[in-house]
Image (spheres, grey):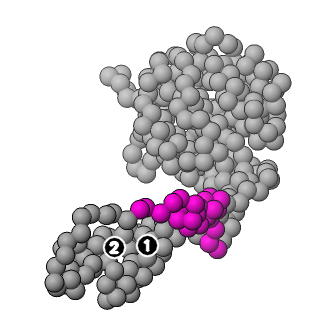
Amino acid sequence: MISLHWPWLLAALPLPLLVRLLLPPVPPHREAALLVPFLEDFESREDSPRRRPRRRISLWLAALAWVLLVIAAARPQWLGEPLDLPMSGRDLMLAVDLSGSMQEEDFQLGNQWVDRLTATKRVAGKFIKRREGDRIGLILFGEQAYLQAPLTFDRQTVNTLLYEAAIGLAGKKTAIGDAIGLGVKRLQDRPVEDRVLILLTDGANTAGRIGPLRAAELAARKQVRIYTIGIGADEMLVRSFFGTRRVNPSRDLDEKTLKAIAEKTGGRYFRARDTNELRQIYKILDELEPVEQERQRFRPVRALYPWPLGGALIIAGVLVYSLRLTVDG
């Protein structure tokens, strides 16, 4: 369907006719007469009967150019078929730990041992890509918590920012409470059913201005559900000069606090000891039922004004060229 963005500009169409009717005509230019015996040779080209059809054509072309110019000014546009926007979904805020302990290489991708953050990027990145229709936000925290990406439908940008994160970027310690507080601040203005925070960490709260349980109480008052993920293997083999021994790389993981945070907010605690468990956790999170929001629609718009504008410019060029031929001739 074709429509005009500023249809009121069509009122300018009769403007040249009004100018011609209301303004007095320009008086003819008079000069001293010259008497010659061969007057017909000096007959005015403008008054010549041979020139009158050309003048009429020029007048009609000028009128057509004016009409096209006014139509272009009214901004004609083509409206496509209405399309539904993918607006049914959740507002998911991801909080990812970047503290120094995330560099522990106790996760395996294929046949290669990688650090915890690399495994998180791989699994969480695929999770972000699957959440079509959701608004995703990203918080990175260590000694301090930073909003890396506000809630947005641009999942590709969020994924890129997650992959660019580096261990120690926010400090070596862990401020779980500050990360929760920042997430609550960003989610509190959203509809109650949509407020979800997914927090991934491998340690205990060792920094920050607010404790994790106090932050969880604030989240519960704001009706923000928090899903906590404790990441890290239970044991790994370490080779040394005295032989091979088993150690627990997750000895600093505060599971008790993470479980309490989830319970206070109506969420759930998950334990990821390896890459497969981490994938399973995100699959469970992937099954969160979307909340139907008010459906929004839009119609693609394509501007058409260049066509009448181009036609008006071409006609104007033809008229100028014709006038030059008349003057030179």
Sequence-earlier tag: 1 or 2 = 1
Residue 237 at least partly seen: no
Residue located beneath label 1 in the image: 62
Quarter of the rendering occupied by the N terminus: bottom right
Give the residue displayed 44% in from the left and 23% down from the top: 168
Q: Which mark is residue 319?
A: 2
Amino acid type, label 1: Ala
Separation of marks 1 and 2 at Cα, in angstroms = 8 Å
Relative to 294, say whether 250 is above or below.
above
Horizontal placement of 140 versus 315: left or right? Answer: right
Examine the image and state in which quarter residue 207 appears: top right
In this picture, is 78 found above or below 187? below
Residue 110 within the magenta-colored segment of the rendering: no
Magenta span of residues: 1-27
Under circle 2, the secondary element is helix
Label count reads 2
Q: In percent of the image, x 47 and y 18: which residue is there?
A: 171
Percent of width and height locating residue 137: 60, 38
Asked if marks 1 and 2 touch (Cβ < 8 Å), the reply is yes
At 25% from the left and 76% from the top, the residue drawn is: 326
Q: Position of residue 294 (x, y in %)?
A: 79, 53
Q: Position of residue 66 (x, y in %)?
A: 48, 68
11, 205: nearer the viewer: 11
Residue 56 position within the rendered picture, expressed as x and y whole percent measured from the top left? 42, 82
In the rendered image, the quadrant that contains the C terminus is bottom left
Residue placed most toward the observer, 111 or 292: 292
Near mark 2 (Cα within 10 A), the count class, few <14, some 14-19 or many ≥20, is some
Which kind of residue does numbered mark 2 sit on?
Leu
Task: State the residue lying farthest toward the top.
Answer: 209
Q: Secondary structure at mark 1?
A: helix
